Structure formats: structure tokens, C-alpha cells
Image: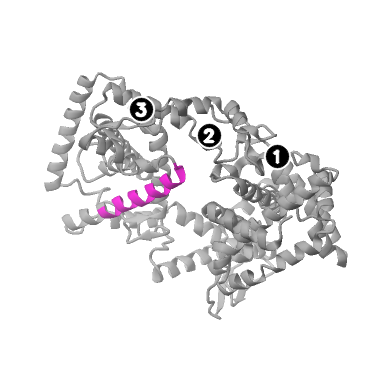
Amino acid sequence: MMTRKQMKKQGRISLKKHYVIFVAACLIAAFLAAEFRSSLNFSTAQTYEQTYEQIETDTSDPDDSGSYLIRTSMRSIGWEDVLRTIVEDNTEAGREMSEQIRKNAIEHAETGNPAFGRTRGVFSGIVNQVSSGSIIVTAVAAMASVTGSENIGVMVMIILGAIFMFLFWFFVQNTFSVVIRRVFLEGMEYKRVTPQRFVFLLRIRKWMKASWIMFVKYVFYSLWCLTIVGIAVKRYSYYMVPFIAAENPDMTAREAITLSRKMMAGHKWECFVFELSFAGWELLSMATMGLFGILYTNPYKMASFTRYYAGLRALAKEKNIPGSELLYDTYLYESADPRLIEQTYADVLSVVEDMPEDEPELSGWRGWLAKNFGVLLFRRQEEREYEQRQAEMVKIYDLIDDAQGEAYPVRLYPVPEERRRKLVQSLNYMRHYSVWSLIVIFLGLSFFGWLWEVGMHLVSYGNFVNRGALHGPWLPIYGTGAVLILTVLCRFRRNPALEFVATIVVCGFLEYMTSLIMEIATGGMKWWDYSGYFLNLHGRICAEGLLVFGIGGLAIAYVIAPIVDDIVSKISEKKLRIICIVLLAVFIADAGYSQIHPNAGRGVTDIEARKELQEKEGTTVV
């Protein structure tokens, strides 16, 4: 077995290879409060003013002819106080307190940072309901109407809340320690660990079993904590349970716990000293309020202890410790035989082998457009063949690293993974788009955007309004965003997470600049204003809209655009040209006319009037 120094060195090597995903795994664990929760101290460090808040609300309690007075010191009032008010007084008092909290929050947002608007939008509504406790009041009132008793309604809410918290702990917080260790285990031997490994328990349908193993371990340890010796001794006796479950979640809880006890026999003090050797790193993390812990200490410590587990596992195998035969995931610790890989991944390797070493590329500026923006001016036979080969690569893209020995070979895992996605897929999202397809997508999404905003206004106000600065049925900002996603962001398509973030950035920049330029060109006239929305920037963009853009961008890149392109490719190119040229000419004419006489007026640019109407009727206006 390696020394502490050697294990730390190997841990640093693993961390260097997989820094991003290791840090992400530890950060997610901290957010979920599964592990490393103290590392988030930097995000909550803030200064509180020592003020006293006083809220008076009338009460309908017949035993109280005065007013219900609540005083809180050196803290903010929240939903806990609302629930306490409901229990001690009645629902109406809680509702009034909730409304007062909401009003105070809105006033604070308006006088403070306008980016944290609290008056308009879905996000603002959610934030207000949660922070003010109105969601608790509504739920209690609903329960009371069903049960016929307010006290029973409160009790039901408390019970449901407790059940929800337990389920979240049982299935998420309690189990994520197994997930994170699986990620680190695969990082020991292989060059790549994909984000899909975070859901490996779901793919093998063993999430419930892993949750149960960790739950039983928690119960056993909690009982041992009733004794003075058990607190320390059993902590290290059960230390390897999450590692064992990460390797083989198909074990019973008793098997995993018993095996951990036997593996740790004679190694508890050694494990304690190994933990103590990270004291300097922990102090550095504390000195930076947890920031250094997130960026280095936590993943470094986890990677080192993963090596420690591997060493104890090897010893257990060597000594034939009962239960060690259940640790049979050999390929976590050594690469599979190339012949076995070749046999298991024959379909994947055949596609790779069929690809020519020197992929033929288009020459000149047409090749530059195809390579950097995924655009094809013409669909010639050689381009169709290239796209077909690329489609085959996309179908098996997730398995190429496995087949080449760079990632853990999931097909060789002792517990077979459920193949939720078929190898043969109908859509090739890594395709190139012709100019005609892009024109159809631009006009189609512009028309859809117009339908969406007109429909939203119709539902909100009951009247038809031609939304947008143009007079025709299109909002070009939607179509422009779609085309930018397919062209400028074509290189990000292989990574949905990067595609999502890049879409938010590009579409946010597009919307902000469009708003700014239109206001400058028209002397300050506005077609939308997000002031009052939670997390808005100068009223031109807001978090709510950007989130919709991000989700919509994924739908466009991976589903909508490929489907449209398939349909377009079936139309005669001559007919397609005529249709596109005619529609594009109409659009350009409308844009030219609207530059001189923009579409404005009631329901389009009367932002202030619509805000006042919203405040009166309690509706949301964009």
C-alpha cells in the first residue's frame, strides 16, 4: 500500500487531469449540503445592521381587541415567522404579515439595486412568494378548506414539509456522496470522466439501493453516537461505505457496512492521521471563507482518499477478506484488454475505422463558412456524404472515448446499464445548414415569436395587438437569435452545457443591443422594458428572459432546426429558392418601411401605461 505522500501525489495527478469535473462535483455536493457545506461560507458572508423591525397587523382573534405586534431583532422576517403567526393567531394575520414583508422587500429593491427588481415577472413572483411566506399562507388556507380546520391544515403542512425534507435528504443529500466518489474513482485510471457519470446510478437503476445503503449506515452511526467511543470509532469503521457503494451499489446495506468495518480494521488511526495531514489546507480554506476549499482543498482531499480506498481494497483482495469478492469492478483500477474492448465496441470502432484519415474539406471561402459557422451554400453529393458520416459519428459520440480506452468502458460494467437512448438516432444535430434552410428557420422563428407575443398579449389583455417594430407578422429578434445559435455557436453543439451558457450570452447581448439601438434610433421609444423583473439589466434584459432563451436555444439546436432542415431538404431546390426569395423580399420591404414609420402605439410602445394597468389588475406585462 502506498504511503501518505504517494497517495497525495497520485491525488494531485488525478486532480490535474480532471480539475473541472472534480471541482464541479465537490461544489454540487456543497450546494446540496451533502458534503463540504462549510466551503460555501464565502457566499453567505455579509454584514447585518442591528436594527429592530416592527410590524403591526390587525387580528380577527376575538380574544384580542388590540393589534398583533411582532418584534424581531438583528435578523430579517421570513416565512418561519409567518407560519408561527398563523399557528399563534390565524391565517388572516399571517397573510397580512406576508403582504407587509412583500411590500418592504419591493421598496428595498426599488431604493437599492434596480437589477433585483421584485415587481414584475415570473421570477419576481416566485421570489416574493417564497421570501414573504405567502406560499405558506396559501397552502395552509387550501389545507384548511379541505380539512375544515385551520389547526389541522397547519399540522398537515408541517407533516408534508417534513416528508419532503426527508425525501430530499434520503434520495439526494444522502446519496450524492456515492455519486461523487464514483466520479473520482473513474478519474484514477482514465483520461476523461464525462458529466453523464453523475447519473450512473440512474442508468443502472440502482439509485434506490445506494440510498438505502447510505441510510442504514447513517442510522447505525447515529445509534453509535449515543456512546462516547462510538462517535470516533464508528466514523472510521464506516468510512469506506460510500466508496464501496460507488463501486458496487448492488450490494445489501449490511454487506457494504460489514465490508467497510473489515477493511478499516487496523487502519482507523491511520485514516485519522491521513485526515489530519490536510489540516494546513483546511486552515487555508477557512482563511478564505471556504473559497480555496472549493477550488482546491476539497477535490484534492477527495482524490487522495480515493487512492486510499483503492489501496485498502487491494489489501482486502490480497487477504481474501469475506465480502471483498463483491468488489468486482476491475476496470476502475486497470484498463481492459484491447481485444475485449474491440469485441465489445465493435460497432463503434467500425464507424471510426470507416472514417478517412484525411477528411475531405471544402476549399476557399465556402470551406471557411462550413468549418467555422456550419453553413453550406450548396448541397453537393460529396457534402451529403460528409454529413452522413458525421451523423454516424454523432450517434456514437458518447462511446468513442470508451472504445479508445480514454474513459471508463460502461459496457463492461458488471451491472448492465439501461440503454435509455438508442444507438440509431433520427436527428443529426451536428449538421451543416444551407442558406435556404437558414432563411426558412429565420422567417419561421420570427413568425413564431410574433405569434407568441401576440398570443401572450391577447391572453393578458383580451385584445389583439400587432407586437414588434415591424408591420408584418414577424419579430426578427427571434429569427436572428436562432440563426446565431446555429452558426456562431456551431462549435459548442457537442456540449449541451456549453451550448446553453453560450446561448444565454449571445441572445442576451443581441436583445440588449437591439433594445439600445432601437431606443437611440427612435429618440427613446421602447418596445419592451424589463424594469421590475428580478435580475434585470437597465430594463433591457432579465434573468427570466435569458433562461427562456437558453432553453429555447437548446430546443432549436437539437430538435427544431434539424427537423426543419429535414423538411426543407425534401423540397425541390428551385421551388425553395422562389419561396425564400419572395418571403425575404417582403420582409426587407417591411423592414425598410418600418425604419421610416415604425409600428408603435397602444399595446406596442406605451410601456408606462401598461405598467400602470398591470399594477391595477395585478397582471404581468412584458
Question: Which one is closest to the eye, mark 1 or mark 3?
Answer: 1
Residue 222 position within the rendered picture, expressed as x and y whole percent measured from the top left: 81, 58
Q: Which residue is drawn at 38% across and 32% down?
A: 560
In the image, residue 473 above or below residue 191: above
| Quadrant of res 365 | top left
Residue 292 position within the rendered picture, expressed as x and y whole percent measured from the top left: 55, 67
Q: Residue at x 31, y 30 (%)?
A: 360
Element at label 3: helix
Marks 2 and 1, how far apart at CA: 19 Å
The residue singled out by tag 1 in the image is 329
Position of residue 442 in the picture relative to residue 120 (left or right): left
Q: Is residue 300 magenta?
A: no
Disc tally is: 3
In the image, residue 615 above or below residue 564: below
**Label 2: few (<14), some (14–19) or many (≥20) C-alpha neighbours in 10 Å:** many
**Label 3: few (<14), some (14–19) or many (≥20) C-alpha neighbours in 10 Å:** some
Q: Is residue 496 magenta?
A: yes
Q: Residue at x 26, y 48 (%)?
A: 604
The residue singled out by tag 3 in the image is 387
First in sequence: mark 2 vs mark 1: 1
First in sequence: mark 1 vs mark 3: 1
Q: Residue at x 44, y 32 (%)?
A: 394
